[in-house]
Image (cartoon, rainbow, N blue to C red):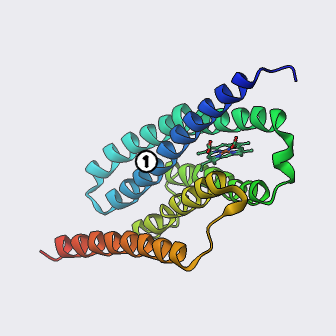
Amino acid sequence: MIFSPETYLWFKSFHIIGVVVWFAGLFYLVRLFIYHVEVQNEKEEIRDVFNKQYTLMEKRLANIITTPGMILAVIMASGLLYMQPVYLTQTWMQIKLLFVTFLLIYHFYCYKIMNELTNNQYNYSGQQLRALNELPTLLLVVVVMLVVFKNQFPTSAASWLIFGLILFMAASIQFYAKWRRNRKQFT
Ligand code: HEM
């Protein structure tokens, strides 16, 4: 092996740093899309100012944070696999790669939405974008669990119960937020 075992830990550290930056960017980017879409209900002069500002913020966030985070995570992951190619033959890694592919599709889909918003030719409501914003959370949970549990992925009844409780709590927070938004609209 041309790399020392310590190099593996360097790759892993920067892989995790890349993943954190990537996700921070993805979460905030779609939040900005929601604000961008919802400002269209305002008066024209307000709308124009916010459109310009949101477009600038989205472009900077996507190009300076989100995509570099993704590139760092992927390059470091390649280093990890180069040093530990046996992982590629293991089921947990193959499933992880499938979910990472979904995440990459989501990443580039965000670019599509960003360009549509820039050209003011989009087709989404704030509500649809809020639903879309849940997707990376799910992918994050599954991918982190796969990499931690590997082939011992928990499938017992107790694990499903915990998983169900987490989903229930997440759904309750969403419903509460929606209820508050509706209440604000009608008061
Ligand atoms: C480009 C696709 C990816 C590949 C090829 C990949 C590959 C790897 C490999 C080989 C490891 C080292 C596993 C070990 O030594 O135990 C690792 C660790 C890790 N990966 Fe990824 N990964 C990718 C994307 C991601 C994504 C998108 C996430 C988060 C959603 C993620 C989260 C993690 C975490 C948290 C660890 C540390 C796990 C630990 O040390 O217990 N990876 N990854």
* Relative horizontal placement of residue 159, taking residue 39 as reference (left or right): right
Q: Nearer the viewer, residue 59 or 80?
A: 80
* Quarter of the rendering containing residue 127: bottom left
Q: Quadrant of ligand 1?
A: top right
SS class, disc 1: helix
Amino acid carrying label 1: it is: Tyr
Residue 40 seen in the figure: yes
Tell me where residue 103 appears, x and y as whole percent.
64, 55
Q: Nearer the viewer, residue 48 or 73?
A: 73
Tell me where residue 58 appears, x and y as whole percent.
47, 42
- For image coordinates 41% across by 53% down, the residue present is 31
Q: As displayed, is residue 182 above or below residue 139?
A: below
- For image coordinates 65% across by 32% down, the residue present is 72
- For image coordinates 48% across by 38% down, the residue present is 61
Q: As displayed, is residue 171 above or below residue 57?
A: below
* Relative horizontal placement of residue 18, taking residue 5 as reference (left or right): left
* Quarter of the rendering containing residue 1: top right
State the quadrant of the C terminus.
Answer: bottom left
- Toward the left, the furthest residue is 187
Q: As displayed, is residue 25 above or below residue 133?
A: above
Q: Determine which residue is flagged by label 1.
A: 28
